[in-house]
Image: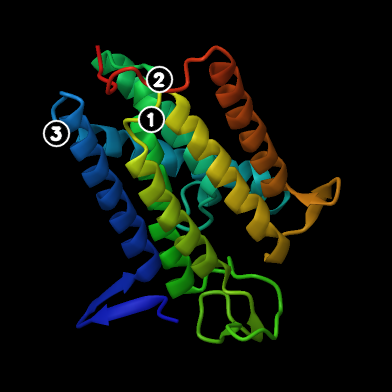
Amino acid sequence: MYPEINIGPLTLQTFGLMFGLGFIAAGLVVGRRFKELGKPADWAYEMAFAALIGGLVGSRVYFVIENWDDVSDDLLGNLFSGSGLVWYGGAIGGALAVLGWARWRGIMTLLLADVAAVPLTIGYAIGRVGCQLSGDGDYGRAWDGPWAMAYPDATVPTDTPVHPTPIYETLFMGLAALVLWRLRDRFRPGILFALYLMVAGFERFMVEFVRRNGDVALGLTQAQLLSVAMILFGGAWIAIVAARGQLRAPTPPRFA
């Protein structure tokens, strides 16, 4: 594991590096997609910046709410701490910030949700590389299988071989990003994002069976319950549009 990289007097956190790389990769994808859709590629930087700020705020607020009993004694200190970034909170905060930006730019349509599908997927895949390198505790349960790994030098160390779940997630979501990118012009606006919801929900639902998170209801973890909601919402969205015979795009999508 490499939680830190030392370059002379400079110490870099590998999770932070992958976090930043994920945003850069997402921004490059958004820029190319905006160019294809007839919008300035530079808007990708604005959108990525809005997502970054909203994501950081959302992830911290979600972390504080989720761990209220542990952080309420030092609320401000924990709110502005550099640790404890929760993906779902980041997704909610980032989405709200991007919607505000889109309203300002006058492109708050379903097509914008499709534009975000691939960047969200590839950003998640790269972010999990950071989890693997830093060993931040997102690894799975104890396991003695052929590719089990221990994390003795991790940020959250363990000498017990476990499922390397960040690797599972990076591989799955990296492949999903490629598939979604190839499908980007085939459906009516909104359908690609619905597919993203189903794919991301399925991936997280399945990986939770070998992660260390505890059950909260119906024998499922909190992440699995949220994943089920994502799958059902995305599936219902696609089913309704398909029932109307409007699934395929008659022409390549464009912003108005």
Tag 2 secondary structure: helix
Is 238 situated left or right of 247 in this image? right
Residue 188 lies, in percent from the top left, at: 40, 21
Tag 3 secondary structure: loop
**Residue type marked 2:** Leu
Looking at the rendering, in which quadrant would you find the N terminus? bottom left
Is 32 situated left or right of 5 in this image? left
Residue 37 lies, in percent from the top left, at: 20, 26
Question: Disc 2 marks which residue?
Answer: 110
Residue 93 lies, in percent from the top left, at: 47, 34
Residue 87 lies, in percent from the top left, at: 52, 48
Identify the mark at residue 42; answer none if there is no mark.
3
Question: Disc 1 marks which residue?
Answer: 114
Tag 1 secondary structure: helix
Sequence-wise, the earlier of marks 2 and 3 is 3
Is 125 situated left or right of 48 in this image? right
The residue drawn where x is 60% and y is 23% is: 239
User: Few, some or many C-alpha atoms within 10 Å of disc 1 (few <14, some 14-19, many ≥20)?
Assistant: many
Measured in 3D between alpha carbons, the distance from the residue under mark 2 to the one under mark 3, in whole angstroms, is: 20 Å
**Residue type marked 3:** Asp
Front residue of 62/177: it is 177
Front residue of 3/246: it is 246
The residue drawn where x is 61% and y is 83% is: 148
The residue drawn where x is 47% and y is 71% is: 132
Discs 2, 3 touching: Cβ within 8 Å: no
Find residue 250 and report its image quarter: top left
Looking at the rendering, in which quadrant would you find the C terminus? top left
Measured in 3D between alpha carbons, the distance from the residue under mark 1 to the one under mark 2, in whole angstroms, is: 7 Å
Query: Would you say residue 74 is visible in this rendering?
Result: no
Q: Is residue 53 above or below residue 166?
A: above
Sequence-wise, the earlier of marks 1 and 3 is 3
